[in-house]
Structure formats: structure tokens, C-alpha cells
Image (cartoon, rainbow, N blue to C red):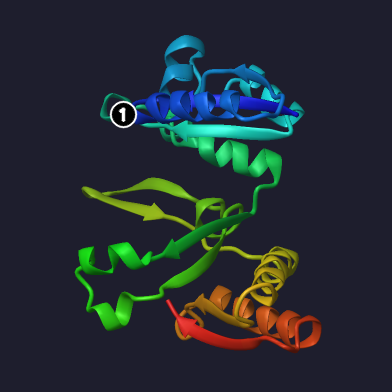
Amino acid sequence: MKIAVLPGDGIGTEIVAEAVKVLQAIDLTFEMETALVGGAAYDAHGHPLPESTLKLAMQSDAVLFGAVGDWKYDTLDRPLRPEQAILGLRKNMGLFANFRPAICYEQLVGASSLKPELIAGLDIMIVRELTSGVYFGEPRGIEDLGNGQRRGVNTQVYETYEIERIARVAGDLAMKRGKRLASSEKRNVMESGLLWNEEVTKIITTEFPELQLEHVLA
């Protein structure tokens, strides 16, 4: 198995260095190749996601990614900021589904600011869509309207297939857990939210009839 090691910036370099030690300690053989990404890549190559880094990621079986970003890059044009490396990897590699677990272990119940009866036993998996929506929708940008006025525009766009594929990932995962699924959108004020609601309902009710589906306003 080949792993692309992309430490990135700041704490990312520290975290990935320790993760590599763990990979080297287990009884498996990995081929690991390191490349620059984020601000470090911009400093060296003038772009947060150089072609060589993207090529390595695409040719690898897995990517070990640290973190990117630093205040000193905040004045760069948006396409050159370190964070664009994350969006570029997501888009080019088709990484449309992000798993975000929220678990509260018994030993940590007392450390939460929430009441014990609310936090005890918490085990939620959030499935987040990553390659569509407002991050990638067009048109976008800032325009000068004159008379000292400017306008910032971001467009929220989803197509049917993008909603269907994330719904299937969430449905598959929910079937292996408690067979309960909550879908979150803004159908009350956004047409994209209404489309999301309708398409998720169609996929879950037809392909995962055993699931208990709930719709929640974001």
C-alpha cells in the first residue's frame, strides 16, 4: 500500500510526524512518500496544491493529511491560499463524503459542559457532503457596485446525483448502526434545501426502507 504523506503547515507537521511513527511501528509494510501542500507548497512552488503533489495523491492508496493555513497567507488571492489545497484534493479525488464522529466516552462525561443525562452515551456519526454546495457553486466572488458599495456572492448548488450519492453513503452507514438517520437542510428558505429533502427522502425510503428517517432544519 502506498501512502501519500502531506503534513502541510503548523501543527499538521507535528501530528503527521507522530502518525508516521505509528505506521512504522505496526506489523505492516507501507510505501510512504512525502510532499508539500498548503502554505509550505506555496512558499516552495507558488501554489498550495502543486501538480506533483496532486499526482502523488492520485497515484496513492491513501493520503495522510495534516493541516494547512497560517495568518501570513491571508492577503493572498483566494485561489492561492493554503485552504484551497483541501478543496482541490476533495474535488480531484472525488472525496464527497466526510465522516465526523461525535462520541462521549464514559470517563469524559463529567468533563462536558452539558448535563450528564444529555451527553452520556453520545455516539453520532455526521456525514457531510464535501464537493458540491456553496463551496463550489458558481457564480461567486466580490464585485464593485460603485458609490463605495461592494457585493459578495456565493452560490448554493446541488444536482440530483450529488445528493443521491451522499444519501446512499449515509444510508449504508446508518444500517450498520442504530438504523436512524437525520437529514439536515434549509428547505424552508432555500430551493436547494427543498431539492435535498426530496431526493434524500426518495433514496432512503426506496433503498433503505428499514431506516427511521428524520428531516431537521439546519
Q: Residue furthest right?
A: 207
The x and y percentages for residue 211 are 67, 86
Going 47% across and 78% down the picture, which residue do you hit? Answer: 186
Q: Residue furthest top?
A: 44
Q: How many marks?
A: 1
Placement of 163 over or under 184, stated as above or below: above
Query: Given the image, on which type of amino acid does mark 1 rest?
Result: Asp
Q: Residues within 10 Å of mark 1 (few under 14, many from 20)?
A: some
Most foreground residue, 13 or 197: 13
Q: Is residue 60 left or right of residue 155?
A: right
Q: Is residue 100 left or right of residue 195?
A: left
Most foreground residue, 113 or 202: 113
- In the rendered image, which quarter is residue 59 located in? top right
Placement of 154 over or under 13, stated as above or below: below
Query: Where does the N terminus fall, quadrant-wise?
Result: top right
The x and y percentages for residue 65 are 53, 33
Residue 182 visible to the viewer: yes
Most foreground residue, 140 or 132: 132
Query: Where does the C terminus fall, quadrant-wise?
Result: bottom left
Q: Is residue 18 left or right of residue 88?
A: left
Question: Quick one: SS at disc 1?
Answer: loop
The x and y percentages for residue 149 are 25, 52
Q: Is residue 199 left or right of residue 34?
A: right
Going 52% across and 18% down the picture, which residue do you hit? Answer: 36
Residue 49 visible to the viewer: no
- Residue under label 1: 70
Going 56% across and 57% down the picture, which residue do you hit? Answer: 99
The x and y percentages for residue 63 are 62, 33
